[in-house]
Image (cartoon, helix red, strand yellow):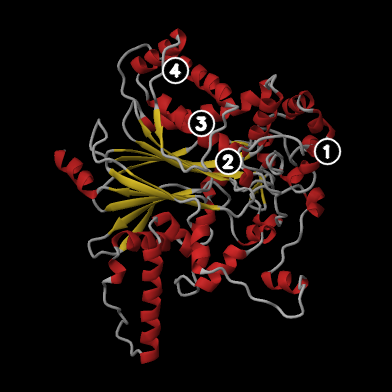
Amino acid sequence: MPAPTQLFFPLIRHCELSRIYGTACYCHHRHLCCSPPYIPQSRLRYTPHPAYATFYRPKESWWQYTQGRRYASTPQKFYLTPPQVNSILKANEYSFKVPEFDGKNVSSVLGFDSNQLPANAPIEDRRSAATCLQTRGMLLGVFDGHAGCACSQAVSERLFYYIAVSLLPHETLLEIENAVESGRALLPILQWHKHPNDYFSKEASKLYFNSLRTYWQELIDLNTGESTEIDVKEALVNAFKRLDNDISLEAQVGDPNSFLNYLVLRVAFSGATACVAHVDGVDLHVANTGDSRAMLGVQEEDGSWSAVTLSNDHNAQNEREVERLKLEHPKNEAKSVVKQDRLLGLLMPFRAFGDVKFKWSIDLQKRVIESGPDQLNDNEYTKFIPPNYYTPPYLTAEPEVTYHRLRPQDKFLVLATDGLWETMHRQDVVRIVGEYLTGMHHQEPIAVGGYKVTLGQMHGLLTERRAKMSSVFEDQNAATHLIRHAVGNNEFGAVDHERLSKMLSLPEELARMYRDDITIIVVQFNSHVVGAYQNQE
């Protein structure tokens, strides 16, 4: 099965990787192994050096595209039918309802809905959700890959295990290690909640397990055995940093198995951001690395909705991040470390997993490439070093952790990659999800604010309400409903079927010009349980 042609380097991805690695194997799903589209630099999370700019097709408008490619004398309109639209939107949706009592405590989470809509081919986003079995709480996360999906795939498989291990008490770690040593069955650490497309890499499972085992062995050695309370924030930070370190180390060491050697290099040289939530009772921790976001939906006393941001974007729009980067490097690099709103003029997120071309020394990069597959050493781009690359590392995977104590008015949490936030304001996101979950906007009288309204205008308002109701009735998943609005909203905030159909009909080479991959998880909280926690204190 051919390898996906954009899993290694972004420049090779757009021109030569299919020729170099045409016989390699990676994905288990045919739909993940497609040729990538040409993408304009303005839409890339990883922009190539100017010397390679000719590899990219210039951005075209939809009008220019259709005018320049008329194959018939009369333009023909083609729109997807509503069932076809629904089939596309619902292809990757997943829902899970949490049992009210999970064997340890009453859960503050009612359940969650998740969904993905690709723009890249294959999709570079990933998602994960799991229940911690040896400790309390749930883990949910979205992962946004760049320069391919290899890193986001690996992080989506591995990060929750590192977090779960970091949260385990010393006694449980010893019990697990003794079971491995004696060949006994291991205690299950996580219960995964996965869509069938959310696959795991079977070939790399042994490698991943060995790295995880080394981590918990070090935790055992560091712990004196004294009973100490686990700090969730510290556990999250340690897990993120350790996984990124293991990704780097595995690529440096390599593997005698040619497939695994190729895999670990692709994982390390591609990159991924991560936004992860850990919910345990009323304790909500969000660990974020990159520019995905976590947004809390709060219902006020008057029934209106407000958005509370629980993460900060790590990019050029965050002045504190820019200042952090400048302070970590000599003053003579102040003008080059962030250039054109990108790290070294190339990378949009300022924190990410993988991306070793922004972390390793030049000598280390050369050594790994020279000892890697012959195709790497023969390709010019593998020898390319980012401009003004003097004092690495320039990039970190260390997350920023936010803590929030849940209240009865906190109704839901939205975790989403930047594909959603590029198209919708946070307040609109929370309002749409809140109205979907409560159905309140169907029952409220239409308010016109004291203005005189004509019969035609009132008819328009009623038609808009009917359109909203029909879209709610056809969606049984809050994430799907949000994607429908993100892609199909018109200037009035209502879903326009014609617009939605056009956006979903765009060919692969155009879709990425108009939007990014979108991945969403909507977590719904149990207000009664949250209120009961407060009353106990």
* Mark drawn on residue 158: 3
Q: Nearer the viewer, residue 334 or 236?
A: 236
> Do labels 1 and 4 touch, CB within 8 Å?
no
Q: Nearer the viewer, residue 355 or 184?
A: 184
Question: Mark 4 falls on what kind of element?
Answer: helix
User: Callout 3, which amino acid?
Assistant: Arg
Q: Quadrant of the N terminus?
A: top right
Q: Quadrant of residue 227?
A: top left
Q: Nearest to the eye among marks 1 and 3: give it.
A: 3
User: Callout 2, which amino acid?
Assistant: Ala
Q: Which residue is mark 1?
A: 380
Q: Nearest to the eye among marks 2 and 3: give it.
A: 3
Q: Which residue is mark 2?
A: 272
Say few, some or many: other residues with alpha carbon within 10 Å of mark 1 (under 14 / 14 to 19 / 20 or more). few
The residue at the far top in this view is: 182
The relative height of residue 174 versus residue 95 in the rendered view (above or below) is above
